[in-house]
Image (spheres, rainbow, N blue to C red):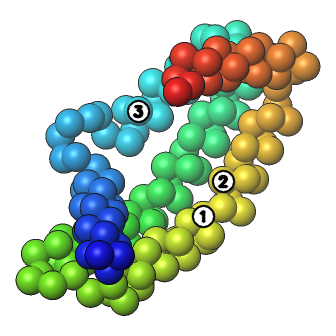
Amino acid sequence: MNVKRNAILAAAAVAVAALVATGCGSCRPSPEKRADWAVKKISSKLDLTKEQKVKLDGIKVEVLAKFKEEKAAHAKIGTEAIALVKSDKLDEAAVNRLLDTREAAMKRLRPFIVDKIVEFHTMLTPEQRAKLASLMEEHRARWKE
């Protein structure tokens, strides 16, 4: 019974990974459009200065470039996940290898993302940081289970 449950959970994880990897096709805007929207929203909500907007736009460009570098590896994971789901029997070792690959990619990106978060935080005034924290608290309260 436990093995069957694990296999079902693994299949569900692979299916979710496949959906994440494919990005749901046309169900949402491109990463560039989402990033532009986010920068515009952040700039407006935090009342950024022109200099801060330029810095934030630079961060956006760097993040988009880094994610574009990772896109091929991400797509490969999605392709492999789909192949696993199509197979007659789900191989737990293969699922674990696939998830290990994804975790390794996340570990590669982590220092870069942390650096960009610190860079963004450093450019904000104390008032803007307080406003950002307030917005984060509101968002968290809205989506809290």
Q: How far apart, in angstroms, are the residues tagged by discs 1 and 2?
A: 6 Å
According to the image, label 2 marks what residue? Answer: 113
Give the numbered dot on residue 34: 3
- Residue 68 rendering spot, x and y as whole percentages: 42, 59
Residue at x-position 56% and y-position 25%: 144
The vertical placement of 120 against 2, above or below, is above
Q: How far apart, in angstroms, are the residues tagged by discs 3 and 2?
A: 17 Å
| SS at badge 2 | helix
Quarter of the figure with the N terminus: bottom left
Dot 3 or dot 2: first in sequence order is 3
According to the image, label 1 marks what residue? Answer: 109
Please tell me in which quadrant of the rendered image residue 88 appears: bottom left
Please tell me in which quadrant of the rendered image residue 19 appears: bottom left
| SS at badge 1 | helix
Who is closer to the viewer here, 56 or 93?
93
Name the residue furthest front.
Answer: 1
